[in-house]
Image: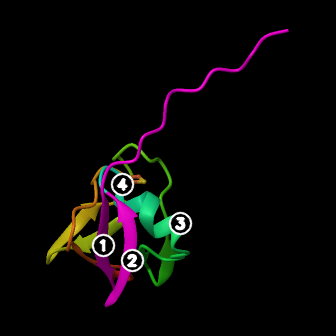
Amino acid sequence: MSESRRLPRERQQPVTVDVDGMPVACFAGETIATVLLADGVTAFATRGGEPRQPLCNMGTCFDCSVVVDGIPLTRACLTPVADGMSIRTGQGD
Ligand code: FES
């Protein structure tokens, strides 16, 4: 019988980010996409009025774009959270 193996999981330090004006507790090293999905965010951005969420999770589709500290088109799937970071969702055309 084989045993499944898992990599050790050690979370980094707790941090708080601002998501659309609300504080969200998370851990350093997590991506913005991870934090938003865990927080129940359903529209990272909009395109043609349609809500968008992460699709590729590797930085090519931009469906996870959010505004981070005033910088638009930040890919949530590639960007780790940092304490005090301001994240704005629902931006788009
Ligand atoms: S999910 Fe495709 S770029 Fe982030």
User: What is the quadrant of the C terminus in the image?
Assistant: bottom left
- Disc 1 under 8 Å from ligand 1? The reply is no
On the image, numbered disc 3 is attached to which residue?
38
Residue type for callout 2: Val
Task: Name the residue at the right extreme.
Answer: 1
Q: Nearer the viewer, mark 4 or mark 2?
A: 2
Image coordinates for residue 46, horizontal then vertical, percent: 42, 78
User: Is residue 90 inside the magenta stretch?
Assistant: no
Q: Is residue 12 magenta?
A: yes
Q: Residue at x 44, y 80 (%)?
A: 48
**Residue 52: x and y, percent?**
48, 70
Question: Mark 3 is on which residue type?
Answer: Ala
Earlier-in-chain disc, 3 versus 4 = 4
Disc 1 marks which amino acid? Answer: Thr
Tag in front: 1 or 4: 1
Front disc: 3 or 1: 1
Which quadrant of the structure image shows residue 27?
Answer: bottom left
**Camera-side residue of 46 and 9:** 9
Residues at marks 1 and 4, CA–CA distance in whole angstroms: 13 Å
Q: Secondary structure at mark 3?
A: helix
Up/down of 5 relative to 90, above or below:
above
Answer whether residue 78 is visible to the viewer in this image. Answer: yes
How far separated are the C-alphas under marks 3 and 2?
Answer: 10 Å
What residue do we see at 30% from left, 55% from top? 13
Q: CA distance from mark 3 to mark 4?
A: 11 Å
* Residue underneath mark 2: 24
Residue at which label 1 appears: 16
